[in-house]
Image (tube, rainbow, N blue to C red):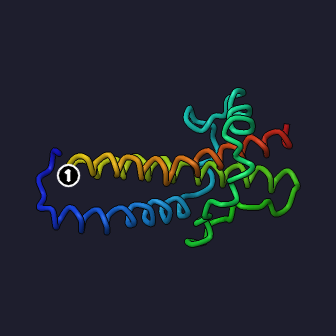
Amino acid sequence: MWVELSPWWIVVVNCVGIPAVHLLVSWVATCLPARVFGGRGAVGRLRRWEWGLYERWLMVRKWKDLLPDAGPWFGGVAKGRLGERDEASLRAFAVETRRGEWAHWVQMVLIFLFVLWTPLPWAWVIVGYAVLSNGPCVVSLRYARLRVGRVLG
C-alpha cells in the first residue's frame, strides 16, 4: 500500500471510483472518433493462433452472449449482433470492436491503480476484479473481430 488512507476512505474511494472508471472510460471511448480505432496497433492486431484459443480452448461462442454490452449506454454501437452484412458495415463493426477492446484495456489498467491505497489481501481482490470484469469482454471482442475478419478476407 503506497498511499495511506483510512479504512473508511478506502471503501468510499473504491466503491465510488471503480464504477466511475468504468463509466468514464466507456463514455470517452464513445466520444472518440472512429478513425482513432481504425488502425491496427500492436495490442489490437489479431494473431493466427488466437482463433484456436478462442474457439476451441475458451469456447467463446458458448458464453459470449452472457456478457453485458454497455456500448449503447452512451450512444455507442451494440456489438452483440451484426446489423447489416455488407463490407462497409462489417468494417464499421470491426472498428467498434476495437473501440470496446480499447475501453476494456484502459479500464483494467486504471482499476489496477486502486491497489495503491488498498491493503493486502483486498488489493488482490481489486486485481482479480479488474481482470475478471474486463478480460472476458476483451476476449469476446477480439473473437468477434476475428470472425468478421474471416468474412472480409
Q: Nearer the viewer, residue 104 or 74?
A: 104
Amino acid of disc 1: Trp
Q: Residue furthest top?
A: 49
Name the image quarter holding residue 64: bottom right
Query: x, y percentage for residue 121?
Result: 26, 47
Q: Residue furthest front?
A: 121
| Residue found at x 49% / y 54% | 133
Location of the C terminus (image quadrant): top right
| Residue found at x 66% / y 60% | 66
| Residue found at x 40% / y 66% | 19
**Circle 1 crowding by C-alpha within 10 Å: few under 14, some 14–19, many from 20:** some
Name the image quarter holding residue 23: bottom left
Q: Residue furthest right?
A: 86
| Residue found at x 74% / y 35% | 56
Query: x, y percentage for residue 47?
Result: 67, 29
Q: Please state the total of marks drawn on the protein image.
A: 1
Q: Which residue is mark 1?
A: 117
Q: Is 14 left, or right, of 66 in this rendering? A: left
Name the image quarter holding residue 74: bottom right
Q: Is 62 left, or right, of 45 in this rendering? A: right
Q: Nearer the viewer, residue 55 or 42?
A: 55
Q: Is 104 left, or right, of 81 in this rendering? A: left
Query: x, y percentage for residue 33?
Result: 58, 57
Check disc 1 and report its element: helix, strand or loop. loop
